[in-house]
Amino acid sequence: SFSGYEPILILTYGVYMNYKFQYKNTAFELFKLSFFFLYSSLAGIVNIIFTVAMIALIYARWDDAGDLLRVVLVIAVLFFVLFQPVIMYNRARRNSKALKELSLEFGDRGIAVEVEGKREYIDWKKIKAGKRFPQMLIIFTDNTNGYILTKRVVGNNYKKVFGDILERIRR
């Protein structure tokens, strides 16, 4: 398995490539992505508000609550703090088993993608968007699909590489 490549120069399809990465995303990277998407959405905000409200209710009413209510309140807090992340990680782990190792080459005119010996070229104009998360960049090829680049894959120079890619997407 290849990972942590520093940017290299390579010539492919007559396109001068600036960066090439060969990798397979991990279950934890998929989990982090799911976590970022959830907690930057309305559902995530509701989860946070509900959890804080449950903790405040436990703090304010613990002495007055009967045993059944105490159990319900603790389970309600644990669902969002413990159970939901465990469920999300297990789903990410299952999904990561289906992922294949891929090669992404970024150049002036687009991205060359290779998976299991099959190559595809995507022009920068066809890229829908790039979204940056902490130590992670998602390159959307349409509204729901894309490629995940992480600091682990790109290396310590990831901020510059992510910036270069985002600049090309915005052109």
Image (spheres, rainbow, N blue to C red):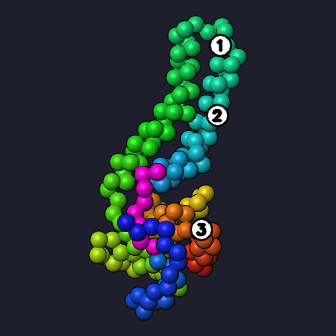
At horizontal 29% and vertical 71% (from top left) the residue drawn is 116
The residue mark sitting in front, 2 or 1, is 1
Q: Name the residue beneath numbered marker 1.
A: 62
**Does the magenta portion include 56?**
no
Q: Secondary structure at mark 3?
A: loop
Q: Earlier in the sequence, mark 3 or mark 2?
A: 2
Residue 139 locus on image (x, y percent): 50, 67
The residue mark sitting in front, 3 or 2, is 3
Do the residues bearing badges 3 and 2 touch, measured as CB atoms within 8 Å? no
Q: Secondary structure at mark 2?
A: helix
At horizontal 53% and vertical 18% (from top left) the residue drawn is 72
Q: Which of the pair 124/134 is nearer the observer?
A: 134
Q: Name the residue beneath numbered marker 3.
A: 156
Q: In which quadrant will I find the C terminus?
A: bottom right
Residue 82 locus on image (x, y percent): 51, 33
Mark 2 crowd level (few <14, some 14–19, many ≥20, 10 Å Cα) = few
Residue 81, picture quadrant: top right
Q: Amino acid at mark 3?
A: Asn
Q: Earlier in the sequence, mark 1 or mark 3?
A: 1
Residue 134 visible in image: yes
Mark number, residue 49: 2
Q: Earlier in the sequence, mark 2 or mark 1?
A: 2
| Mark 2–mark 1 distance (CA, rounded to whole Å) | 19 Å
Q: Amino acid at mark 2?
A: Ile
Residue 44 locus on image (x, y percent): 58, 42
Q: Secondary structure at mark 1?
A: loop
Indicate whether 22 appears above or below 82. Answer: below
What stretch of residues is rendered in magenta?
Answer: 21-28
